[in-house]
Image (tube, helix red, strand yellow):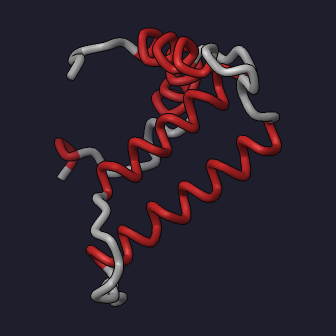
């Protein structure tokens, strides 16, 4: 298991994987459908662990960690297919949270 990789390295790894197939990346609309499908699978697992819907005895045990990994993979594929640098996207959203939303939540030191 490779540890401590950057977001850029994750994007490169996924791109190397996808680049070995003629089909390449899916279209943005197909990618959105895949992401929605994976989100549904994650929601199902969260509901089994923390909600009121236990698994049926014949259902395979899947971990939330695996479902989050599936979501991350599809997110990286989506970003790569649109040439979006996820590190830059993260920095943009953090800037937004640290400026526009800086006083939105109760800080721990304010309690």
Q: Residue at x 57, y 35 (%)?
A: 75
Q: Position of residue 17 (x, y in %)?
A: 53, 19
Q: Quadrant of the N terminus?
A: top left
Classify 36 as above or below 50.
Answer: above
Q: State the image quarter where residue 19 is shown.
A: top right
Q: Residue at x 51, y 20 (%)?
A: 14
| Relative horizontal placement of residue 3, taking residue 80 as reference (left or right) | left
Q: Position of residue 16 (x, y in %)?
A: 54, 12
Q: Position of residue 55 (x, y in %)?
A: 32, 84
Classify 21 as above or below 71.
Answer: above
Q: Residue at x 74, y 20 (%)?
A: 22
Q: Residue at x 47, y 10 (%)?
A: 8
Which one is in front, 106 or 63? 63
Q: State the image quarter where residue 15 is shown.
A: top right
Q: Position of residue 94 (x, y in %)?
A: 48, 27
Total numbered circles: 0
Classify 64 as above or below 97.
Answer: below
Classify 11 as above or below 39.
Answer: above
């Amino acid at each position: 298991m490779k540890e401590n990789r950057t977001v850029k390295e994750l994007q490169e790894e996924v791109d190397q994987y996808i680049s070995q197939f003629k089909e390449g990346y899916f279209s943005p609309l197909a990618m959105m459908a895949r992401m929605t499908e994976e989100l549904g699978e994650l929601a199902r697992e969260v509901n089994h662990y923390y909600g009121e819907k236990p698994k049926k005895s014949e259902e395979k045990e899947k971990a939330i960690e695996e479902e989050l990994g599936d979501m991350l993979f599809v997110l990286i594929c989506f970003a790569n297919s649109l040439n979006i640098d996820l590190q830059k996207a993260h920095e943009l959203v953090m800037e937004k949270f640290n400026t526009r939303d800086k006083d939105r939540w109760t800080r721990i030191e304010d309690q």
